[in-house]
Amino acid sequence: MSPAIWVSGNEGLSLKHWLLLFTLSVVVAFLMNVPTHEQVVFDSRVCPGSHNADACDSEWRQGTFVNAGYSDARLELRLDFEELITSDASHFLSVKPAYHDSVRITFFDYRDRPIRIQHKGDQVVPESVSPLDLERLTFEVPGGARTAEIAIRSVGSLRATLEVDTALDLEGEAIGASDVIAIHDCIRSDVVTVASVDETTSSITVDCGGCSFRDYSAGATVSRVERIKLFVHDDNLCMVRDLSASDCSANDVLLGNVVNLQALYGIDSDSDADVDRYALGKHLTTNDWKKIQTVDIQLLIRSSETAVFDSPQTYLYQGDSVVAGDKRAYKSVSVTANLRNYKVY
């Protein structure tokens, strides 16, 4: 990712700009994703932690995403398969994200009789995992299933989306030899190359060049690493996956009308888990990249209107007082993202 990105102006700091900053902080924090599928519509409700299933009288709401924040409550979902499964191929129901303590799914037939119960999650012992559990928890949909009820508990953010895919779709995403993956938990992550995958035991052997590899607990998540490129083209901030690209289409544009975007990397020089200094990417050594704790994203936006003020505005950006070269309105904002890729092999 380019540490300095230049584009030109928009008006004030709108919700769109805040969403851009949030998106950039997530992109910088993880630098990874997996192929996406169409999210399905489901019913959801949040039940207080002290309530059992029969006592919960919370209102059901419909949507493709639910977020109850950090809560000890139980998140309940209901899904109808009637229009989602249209072939005899094996199908899987996926719950994202994969870090939940407990995800319990009950499948019902056309007479509303339970036909299968499956249970996964960080607190499930022994935990049942699959090579298909890549940034998600997957549950095979039994034949004859009409509906499913899902109960989720999480020590982290209580949120969920659902997807229904064929086995062929998911197997195309399964991790294989030579893939570059990130193994991460709530504290640290390692980026390594897959040497082999044993589908019988769902175990992955990695190659990190003779490194001293950390031991992760059962709750750790495995993700593919995907590189992206942020750059400016025709006064637009673009994000593409083709690292050789020099232009972008309208679908690749994150935002237009931005004056300046900077990424400063927070370095922990003495390994005490605190940031000692910030620097641009071009000033970092190979060893520095292994010690990054945070990224500070700084954005400067200007108005599209050319005569907002009677005289040039003075604004603060990157600690400096700057006099604008025109009569537009300028606004600066920064977001700091904590990283988990503290040690990269």
Image (tube, helix red, strand yellow):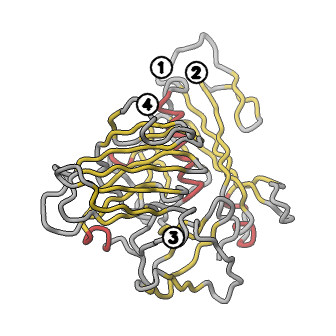
Looking at the image, is mark 1 or mark 4 earlier in the sequence? 4
Task: Measure the C-alpha gap from mark 3 to mark 4.
Answer: 30 Å
In which quarter of the view is residue 268 placed?
bottom right
Q: How crowded is mark 1: few (under 14 residues within 10 Å), some or many (20 or more)?
A: few
Q: Which of marks 1 and 4 is in front?
A: 4
For label 2, the crowd category at 10 Å Cα-Cα, with few meaning under 14, some 14 to 19 and many 20 or more, is many
Element type where label 3 sits in the image: loop
Label of residue 58 in the image: 4
At a point 49% along the width and 52% down the height, the residue shown is 231
Q: How much space separates mark 1 and mark 2, taking CA atoms?
A: 8 Å
Amino acid of disc 4: Ser
Q: Position of residue 190 (x, y in %)?
A: 63, 71
Give above or below for 271 relative to 23: below
Q: How far apart are marks 1 and 3 (CA)?
A: 58 Å
In the rendered view, does 112 fall on the left or right side of 326?
A: left
Q: Report the amino acid beneath label 3.
A: Glu
Report which residue position mark 2 lands on: 329
Mark 2–mark 3 distance (CA, rounded to whole Å): 55 Å
